[in-house]
């Protein structure tokens, strides 16, 4: 399975770097076009300088965020979002030159170019035009949520969540062009107009643009700061010397013992942009009662999940991977970085991690997440008869799942495909707010691209047909899985069943047959409490059937799903299904006699895949 590698477009200009850093601004603009660029790129120099020593994995996304930061400063000073189109070439030259001066080369494969610098959202170039377009309630929500110190993780989460909600409510739809640019407008506006500290504040830049400057001592502290720095450096040197002496002695002692022949290993590299707590193995043991079986709250192919209590009384979920080895470090680091890079009310938050190697237990890889005490959606639908969900709770869960996935697909940078959306990976808090969990199979994906894999990962019954058959992975693969989970939520029936007669049953086919016959409301589980209006129930069923359509291009995006569920928008027409995706041989031959093969989705291949999966171990939520 191919993994995303860091860009290789970096070149070394270390000999010239001290001179470049102190170049005056007018030197950087010598190659500008006849119309000078009004953007002040000097505000981005600290962030680019920091990135030159620790290159970002997504260089295209980093460069785009630099541009958005500069445009936010421009909005603050001029009340304009983008510079005149005549200056686009000059601004592009400034951006490229500044990046190259810090030994960063912009890849030619990036999905933006010279015109995109001056590309407006629906021709809304000014702050006045943009605020006139958005409803006053949306502006009020933005100002109240983002006008805070965004150094606080809770304030940052509240701000980005509001931005995403405003975007999905007012800036997504078939009648809106340049949706990506419109989405960026909200972040630019929030930094320049909604937040009192402005884009010049490092916390604001990190929260809204994911740009970070490593903390360092300020040069304005005078002699006291210098003395403190020298003292700290001396103390650090002494500490290092003491540590090295202890390490050499300890190493010699360990060599005398036969069980210690394997050298200690260093921790895997966790992204420098994360602010995670590294727990010791002793702290994890204390929190879980030495991994007591009584504290197990989840089990899977990857290992066990334990309920734990930290020293400060915080309740957490602790995921302990089994059969760890040096070869598994990359997978562990991948999940940690994925979870730590996203912040949303409908996503499970990561608190920290633990890595350790012991002679008796070998390699230990553990992550610590927020504990969601109300269990999973699977527990409530299929585990506890006495805990049947009411309609308001199911409605809240369906919308929460959609918002969480919409954030992963549209607001996370780079976009994230979860790949294992299922009922057991949707956790519920005390208010039945959905939390998407378990990012062990997640994939980063550059904007506008798809991933093709020769090895499929996921859970039987929830995998999109194009992914199962051809290895084609896009955000629409998550949409299919979401549709299946939503049908489970509405009907109380499991996604997949293998019948005694050897035939397979899918909830998506069953729901589609009822909708086609005009019996849409029969999908709703009998005996559900507090049922809503008929029109609302039908809309949710139709959305679920549309999302679980076997043809990729028939499915909506998650942004569109959120807008439909959160408003009175109508559901787009559902294209017909030429044949069931698990049809038997006779049905396929009968359909092919009257339908062009180009119209079919190759259901026989999917049926073969289903049967093959029945004969092999279930992969579920495992690292591959």
Image (tube, helix red, strand yellow):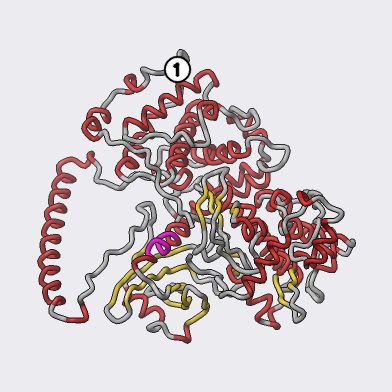
Q: Is residue 434 magenta?
A: no
Residue 420: x %, y % from top left: 58, 64
70 lies above or below 455: above
Residue occupying the far right of the picture: 518
Q: Quadrant of residue 417?
A: bottom right
Q: For the residue carrying disc 1, how many other residues have a C-alpha within 10 Å: few (<14), some (14-19), or many (20+)?
A: some
Regarding residue 80, the answer to whether it shows in the image is no
Q: Which residue is at 32% across, 46% downward?
A: 54
Report the magenta stretch's main SS: helix
In the rendered view, tell whether residue 87 sits above or below residue 10.
above
- On the image, which quarter does residue 285 sit in? bottom left
Residue depicted at 50% across the width and 71% down the height: 371
In magenta segment, residue 330: yes
Nearer to me, 87 or 462: 462
Residue 205 visible within the image:
yes
Query: 113 left or right of 492?
Result: left
Q: Which residue is more in the foreground, 564 or 589?
A: 589
Range of magenta residues: 329-334
Residue at point 70%, 82% (across, down): 385
- Please state the horizontal and vertical placement of residue 405, each as a whole percent of the image: 60, 56
Q: Is residue 199 left or right of residue 550?
A: left
Seen in the image, is 137 located left or right of residue 204? right
Secondary structure category for the residue under label 1: loop
Q: Residue furthest top?
A: 34
Estimate the x, y position of residue 415 in percent, counting from the top left: 53, 49
Say which of 587 and 281 sits in front. Answer: 587
Q: Residue at x 49, y 53 (%)?
A: 155
In the rendered image of this protein, does residue 187 appear above or below residue 338?
A: above
> Which residue, given by chain and number where applicable, does mark 1 sit on?
36
Tell which of 205 and 438 is nearer to you.
438
* Location of residue 383 by image quarter: bottom right
Residue 119 drawn at (x, y percent): 57, 28
């Amino acid at each position: 399975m191919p993994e995303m590698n860091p860009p290789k477009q970096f070149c070394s200009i270390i000999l010239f770097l001290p001179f470049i850093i102190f170049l005056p601004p007018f030197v950087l603009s010598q190659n500008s076009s006849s119309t000078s660029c009004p953007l002040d790129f000097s505000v981005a120099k600290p962030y680019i300088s920091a990135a030159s020593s620790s290159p970002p994995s997504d260089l295209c996304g980093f460069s785009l965020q630099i541009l958005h930061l500069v445009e936010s400063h421009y909005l603050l000073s001029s009340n304009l979002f983008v510079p005149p189109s005549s200056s686009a070439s000059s601004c592009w030259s400034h951006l490229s030159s500044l990046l190259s001066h810090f030994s960063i080369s912009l890849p030619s494969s990036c999905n933006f170019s010279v015109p995109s610098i001056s590309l407006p959202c629906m021709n809304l170039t000014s702050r006045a035009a943009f605020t006139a377009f958005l409803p006053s309630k949306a502006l009020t929500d933005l100002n109240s949520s983002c006008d805070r110190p965004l150094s606080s993780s809770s304030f940052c989460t509240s701000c980005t969540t509001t931005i995403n909600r405003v975007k999905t409510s007012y800036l997504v739809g078939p009648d809106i062009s340049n949706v990506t640019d419109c989405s960026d407008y909200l972040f630019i506006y929030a930094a320049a107009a909604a937040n009192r500290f402005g884009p010049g504040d490092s916390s604001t830049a990190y929260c809204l643009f994911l740009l970070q400057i490593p903390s360092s001592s300020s040069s304005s502290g005078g002699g006291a700061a210098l003395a403190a720095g020298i003292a700290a450096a001396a103390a650090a040197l002494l500490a290092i010397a003491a540590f090295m002496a202890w390490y050499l002695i300890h190493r010699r002692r360990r060599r005398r013992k036969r069980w210690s022949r394997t050298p200690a290993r260093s921790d895997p590299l966790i992204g420098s942009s994360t602010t995670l707590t590294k727990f010791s193995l002793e702290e994890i043991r204390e929190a879980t009662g030495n991994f007591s079986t009584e504290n197990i709250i989840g089990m899977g192919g990857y290992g066990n999940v334990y309920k734990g209590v930290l020293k400060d009384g915080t309740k957490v979920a602790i995921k302990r991977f089994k059969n760890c080895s040096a070869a598994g470090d990359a997978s562990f680091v991948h999940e940690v970085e994925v979870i730590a890079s996203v912040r949303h009310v409908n996503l499970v938050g990561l608190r920290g991690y633990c890595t350790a190697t012991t002679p008796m237990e070998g390699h230990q890889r553990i992550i610590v997440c927020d504990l969601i005490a109300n269990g999973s959606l699977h527990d409530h639908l299929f585990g506890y008869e006495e805990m049947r969900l009411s309609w308001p709770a199911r409605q809240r869960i369906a919308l929460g799942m959609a918002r969480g996935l919409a954030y992963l697909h549209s607001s996370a940078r780079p976009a994230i495909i979860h790949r294992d959306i299922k009922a057991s990976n949707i956790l519920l808090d005390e208010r039945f707010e959905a939390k998407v969990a378990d990012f062990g199979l997640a994939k980063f994906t550059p904007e506008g691209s798809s991933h093709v894999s020769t090895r499929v990962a996921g859970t039987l019954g929830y995998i999109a047909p194009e992914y199962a058959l051809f290895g084609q992975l896009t955000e629409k693969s998550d949409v299919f899985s979401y549709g299946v989970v939503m049908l489970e939520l509405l009907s109380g029936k499991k996604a997949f069943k293998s019948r005694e007669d050897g035939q397979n049953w899918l909830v998506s086919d069953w729901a589609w047959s009822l909708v086609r016959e005009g019996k849409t409301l029969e999908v709703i589980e009998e005996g559900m409490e507090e049922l809503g209006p008929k029109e609302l129930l039908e809309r949710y069923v139709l959305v679920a059937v549309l999302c679980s359509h076997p043809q990729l291009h028939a499915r909506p995006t998650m942004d569109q799903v959120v807008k439909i569920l959160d408003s009175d928008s109508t559901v787009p027409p559902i294209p017909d299904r030429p044949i069931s995706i698990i049809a038997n041989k006779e049905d396929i031959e009968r359909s092919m006699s009257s339908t062009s093969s180009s119209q079919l989705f190759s259901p026989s291949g999917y049926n073969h895949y289903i049967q093959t999966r029945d004969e092999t171990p279930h992969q579920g939520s495992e690292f591959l």
